[in-house]
Image (cartoon, rainbow, N blue to C red):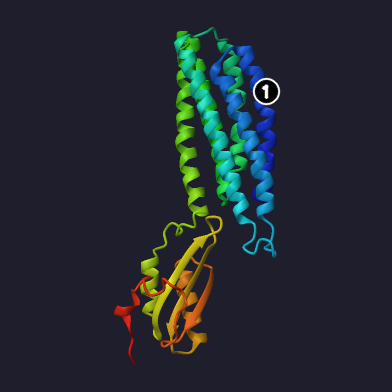
Amino acid sequence: MKSEKKIFVAFILNLSFSVFEFFGGIITGSVAVSSDAVHDLGDAAGIGISYFLEKISQKKPDEEYTYGYARYSVIGSIITTFILLFGSAAVIYNAIRRMIEPSKINYDGMIIFAVVGVVINFCAAFFTRDGDSLNQKAVNLHMLEDVLGWAVVLAGAVVMRITDWALIDPIMSLGVSIFILVNAVRNLKESVDLFLEKTPHGISVNELAEHISDIDGVLGVHHIHIWSMDGQSNYATMHIVTNSDPHKIKEEIREELREHGISHATLELETENEHCHEKNCSAQLKLSSGHHHHH
């Protein structure tokens, strides 16, 4: 099943659920439940945006977006993450307020709500579990949080029912939000790195340059740029200095790049005495000098 289809199902589930929860919070008087409703509504909004952007991101490249639309999916991930950040902040604020002045909670109602919560969210999480896009990961993270959150609420409700210690409610609420905050920040960093064209995780430019320089017939390599569109497909461009048969050299270099997880490459070939027009050319990665193959 396609990423976007899954995201859509998650959206419908979340939306209907947050409405159900909102009433639950009012009926039971539990902050853990009503603050979760706010969080879920935020989730639903985020997922809605993700769905829309994930659909766009599947489009084939055209002359407007020559690289395709994959980055839209990443934007979805960023927006969803921001909604989460605000949501958690609101939940934390409410929880602290409730610690200062605890109020009456209907435990039985809370237990029933929590059971339904665990079941529904478990289905949603199970449904969205495998997807590669960062966007899909962000959505699945929401789902898992929700299952976890409800499991905690359920356990807490049972304990409160036995001990009548109402402080547990806001404490649970705090725990879940802190967990969400930490994960959201991590997700955000990953997405921002993509927009900053940071070299993709796990690829070393220096190592790559050395491997390419070691290919027979390659006299030097400079001007290496590596980036990723969406965290999955990696692109590279570089200038290769060679006097050998360009066809053979290109094949070998592409092969090397594939081993490093780079699927799209643009290679500029120059002969030894050709002048490279890039101004910072000579400064860039003088790794090749030690690797000259003089035959």
Q: Position of residue 36 (x, y in %)?
A: 57, 25
Badge 1: few (under 14), some or many (20 or more) residues near its Cα, within 10 Å? some
Closer to the camera in the image, 219 or 255: 219
Up/down of 291 relative to 285, above or below: below
The residue under the point 67% across, 39% down is 48
Relative to residue 139, is residue 1 drawn left or right?
A: right
Q: Could one spot residue 1 in this view of the protein?
A: no
The residue under the point 50% across, 70% down is 237
Relative to residue 143, is residue 199 drawn left or right?
A: left
Q: Position of residue 47 (x, y in %)?
A: 64, 39
Q: Could one spot residue 280 in this view of the protein?
A: yes
Q: Secondary structure at mark 1?
A: helix
Q: Position of residue 191 (x, y in %)?
A: 51, 48
Up/down of 114 relative to 73, above or below: above
Q: Residue furthest front?
A: 279
Q: Name the residue that disc number 1 marks.
A: 20
The residue under the point 61% across, 29% down is 40
> Quarter-wise, where is residue 119 in the image?
top right
Q: Residue furthest left?
A: 290
